[in-house]
Image (cartoon, rainbow, N blue to C red):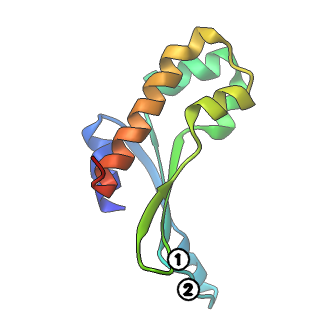
Amino acid sequence: MEKLQAAVKGKGMTVFAGIDHAAGAAEAGVALRPTGLLMFGHARGGTPLMQAVQTIGIDLPLKVLVWQDVAGDTWPSYNEPGWRAKRHRLGPNVAAPIGAMADALNAVAKHATGSP
């Protein structure tokens, strides 16, 4: 999660919130492997999408779930921006912001996981 936050900030995006699902589970007396959600973005990226179709705001800001599997490996998971565009029936006029969003998500996920 720390690597992801650093990558997000390094890309000039704002971290809006972090949710520690494992800590919440522990407070409820339930065990959960490390699992957290980071919410981040930049108004220049998301606003054009919401100007086109406001309902995409339900899928913004960007979110990455960082979770640990039973083997102890850590994984990032997120919804692809292209899927979001299809879900909200965004037209081709927002292809550039969707592409930039996809590039940013892939870059921060790769940085956080150390993938080439």
Image quadrant in which you'd find residue 75: bottom left
Report the residue at 69% width, 19% height from top: 90
Q: Residue furthest top?
A: 93
Q: Is residue 43 visible?
A: no
* Three-letter code, disc 1: Ala
The local secondary structure at tag 2 comes to helix
* Residue 8, label in figure: none
* Three-letter code, disc 2: Ala
Report the residue at 33% width, 56% height from top: 113
**Residues under labels 1 and 2: Cα distance?**
6 Å
On the image, the x and y values in percent for residue 66 come to 46, 62
**Label pair 1/2, CB-CB below 8 angstroms:** yes
> Of 110 and 91, which appears nearest the observer?
110
* Residue 22, label in figure: 1
Q: Name the residue that disc number 2 marks.
A: 26
Estimate how packed mark 2 is, as few (under 14), some (14 to 19) or many (20 or more) residues with alpha carbons within 10 Å.
Answer: few
Q: Can residue 112 be seen in this view?
A: yes
| Rendered view: 34 above or below 92 | below
Report the residue at 45% width, 80% height from top: 71
Estimate how packed mark 1 is, as few (under 14), some (14 to 19) or many (20 or more) residues with alpha carbons within 10 Å.
Answer: some
Report the residue at 25% width, 40% height from top: 10
On the image, the x and y values in percent for residue 31 come to 58, 87
| Rendered view: 78 above or below 107 | below
